[in-house]
Amino acid sequence: MTTTPDVSATPDLIATPDVTVTVIVYNDAERLPRAVASLRRQTHANIEIIISDDHSTDNTPEVARQLASEDDRVSYLRLPENSGGCSAPRNRALDIAHAPYLMFLDSDDELPERAVELLLAAHREREVDFVMGAVERIRVDTGRTSTWMPHLVAERRTVEGIEAEPSLFFEHLSTSKMYRRAFLDRNNLRFPEGIHYEDQLFSAQAYCLATAFTVIPDPVYRWYIAPYEAAESASISNQRHKLTNVRDRIHVQRLIDAFLVSSGHEAVREAKDYKFLKHDFRMYAGDLPFRDEEWLTGFAEIVNPYLAELAPGAYARLPRAERVVLRLVQDGRLEEAQLAARGLGHGVAPRETTMDAAGRVYWGGYVPESAASRRELDVTDLGLDSRPFASAQFRHEITRVERGPAATVTLSIRTYDPGLRLPVGPQVATLLLAPGRRRMKTPFRLDPVRPGVFEGTVRLDLAAAPLPLNGFAGTRHPVLQLTSGQLRNTALLLAPLIFPTLRARVDYRGGALPHEVTVEPEGRASGRLQLRWTPVGVTSRVIRPLARRAGAKAGSRLRKAARLAGALAR
């Protein structure tokens, strides 16, 4: 494919730029100006900005041409047809880039103001093939900010080849790096076209081919994450519900494996396999509880041949809970894999375990037949029968959700205690919920139904929740607490993955102003019971706007307004 820039928008470059930053875009006219503005604000101004458009069908061309007309550093490149990926627009821009250093930006993200300055300074301190920095992740739904793979970028250093730090395979983003053009050209390194997850292959090749690269702890990329975006507009990484997505990811892994062999880097294969298990497979594992039987079967057929090829040492480095999910998938025990996946990262026990003649404890209702399955499903090291009570592992499941009178909900709960930590007889449990600053505690009784299994019901009065005077807008997930003498064990409470959504209005009571409360399945992650508060009436119209304007100085005025509103509501 041959492509030329939009001549009318190409600047006459007076001087050679120090850095070329390529902004790839496809049907993203709304966010493109924000991305380009972040480049125009760079403290190092001698840059070239190429907007590389993968043949957008919205008004991206008009927006891009307008941006190019406003700044001589900006040019617009439009591909003659859509490539369906990120690689082609990056490669076409790379072909016409003028600078000795190159960076890449996606149209829905930004660069922090000093990104170019900091990365270029590191290049000039020491001759390396590329420099990488920290990535700020911003959740668009919550505004929460975090650092991507923070442990890998915490310390400034120069790495003499990937063998010195193979854990850096985990940082596979191409956008967090500034590359020396000569390094890419010398190795004929370009983005692989016609595949998804191209960053993983490109970055693996760059790591292996680089003689040295520098890591700096400063933020150099601002990555906006929309984890629950509509399926039709979600990023490739957020399309894990498609089996084609699974095939694409496995295909890229095989390409990486082949490259490690051809380039003489087999020594880092175990580290790369561990990255795949810990990062790539782990994302799919977290979704397993929400997939149907047909999808699960297709998933197992795709991943199991590849899982059989991975280094045994990579499995050995995983937490036991993740190894259990992997093995259950490999053994075709897919419903059990779903059960195991719901507890990942939360210390949730299995429903049942089995002990062999030697005293080894295994996940599930029988001792596995194969040696490999016995090795991976051996949960003896979890200490289900011996660890301190505060960290003991139980499994609490809501088996039924029923609407009660007014704003009450009745929950039927079953607790599994495979380590037999709880004494025989009824147990006092407490449901904990804190939509405000104070916890609401609802005690109830769990009765034994058979060894290691207890059941009970609890009636949750949502009107009794101690909400702040200025109201509460947000979600909470109740947890379950058990006691043993003075010791307490607080753990995750799983809910049915599907049940009818319940809604109730909570009027003035005990200081809380009107709200609507929604009881619903979480629909993601572990699948907890989700309670969502929405201020309504006077809370929404008066009290919360007053609180936002007054901030911390609201004090007595806010309390008086709340009392008055409460009196009127009654």
Image (cartoon, rainbow, N blue to C red):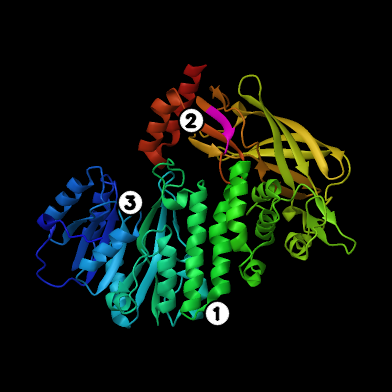
Q: Look at the image and tell me whether residue 46 can be seen.
A: yes
Q: Earlier in the sequence, mark 3 or mark 1?
A: 3
User: Dot 2: what SS?
Assistant: strand
Query: Residue at coordinates 45% horizontally, 61% vertically from top-left?
Result: 148
Helix, strand or loop at label 3? It is loop
> Looking at this view, is 367 or 418 the one in front?
367
Q: How far apart in space, not on screen, are marks 1 and 2 (Cα)?
A: 55 Å
Residue 295 drawn above or below residue 54: above
Q: Which residues are magenta?
A: 517-522
Q: Secondary structure at mark 1?
A: helix
| Type of amino acid under label 1 | Ala
In the rendered image, which quarter contains the N terminus? bottom left
Among numbered discs 1 and 2, the one appearing first in the sequence: 1
Q: Which residue is mark 1?
A: 267
522 left or right of 378? left
- Residue type highlighted by circle 3: Asp
With 146 as the anchor, is 11 left or right in this view?
A: left
Residue at position x 29%, y 56% in the image: 24
| Overall secondary structure of the magenta section | strand
Pair 3/2: label in front: 3
Residue 399 screen position, x and y as percent: 71, 34
In percent of width and height, residue 284 lies at: 56, 52
Mark closer to the chain start, 3 or 2: 3
For disc 2, the marked residue is 534
Horizontal side of residue 81 vs 15, given as left or right: right
Which residue is denoted by mark 3 in the rendering?
108
User: CB under 8 Å between callouts 3 and 2?
Assistant: no
